[in-house]
Image: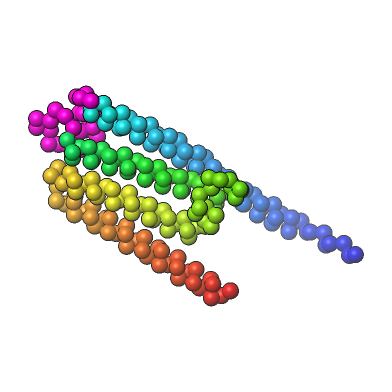
Amino acid sequence: MPKPPIPSSQNLAQRQLSGFIFASRWLQLPLYLGLIAAQAVYVYHFWVELVHLLEAAFGSQTALQALVSSVGYKDTTNLTSLNEVIIMLVVLALIDVVMISNLLIMVIVGGYETFVSRMNLESHPDQPEWLSHVNASVLKVKLATAIIGISSIHLLKTFINAANYDEKVLMWQTIIHVTFLLSAMAIAYTDKLLSHNQKAEH
């Protein structure tokens, strides 16, 4: 059996350089750890708002003022207790936190799996369904969809509290939301075309 050719010093150097460049993907690890820290901040913020809501429901004026300030509600004339509008705005703010938290999970888990290292979660009972076929294109579409959901919540909050916003703010928020929607549709359509072309080539 002939012996394999001994690699030249140039080929060895190229392989070492390629290995070094590929290993540089681990520089993204601190970024994902930072997003996990941001996730913890969102969890803390969620519980602070929830505690304020529960305290205000039991008559705490301090908690009520904190909620009014956080949701941007300005019609505070004779406001001594929670009303339906404030409850809706606070609940939507909590939902907004949850949706942003879900977005962070998609970026952390999907990004790490795609760009840094495999997690080998195939046998894990809690593996997300989408993680089994995640790639850069799938992640991009899912992120765009999540951003549309977050934008929808913000727009709904603005419409419920429309009396406290200028018409220009309402108009621009609507335009920005439609822009997000069109961008997500364009991303999904482009991904569909690329997938179709790849299947045709095979």
Q: Residue furthest bottom?
A: 200
Residue at x 83% of width, y 62% of height: 5
Q: Which residues are magenta?
A: 58-82
Which quadrant would residue 89 be assigned to in this image? top left
Residue at 23% in and 41% down: 88
Residue drawn at point x = 40 percent, y = 42 percent: 101
Residue 60 vs residue 30, the one in the foreground: 60
Task: Work out whether residue 192 can be spotted.
Answer: yes
Q: Residue at the spot x=18%, y=51% of the render?
A: 170
Quick check: 69 left or right of 33? left
Q: Is residue 17 left or right of residue 166?
A: right
Q: How many marks?
A: 0
Q: Is residue 177 above or below residue 186?
A: above
Whether residue 11 appears in magenta in the rendering, the answer is: no
Which residue extends farthest left?
78
Across and down, in percent, residue 157 comes to 23, 45
State the image coordinates of residue 73 (x, y, percent, origin top left): 18, 37
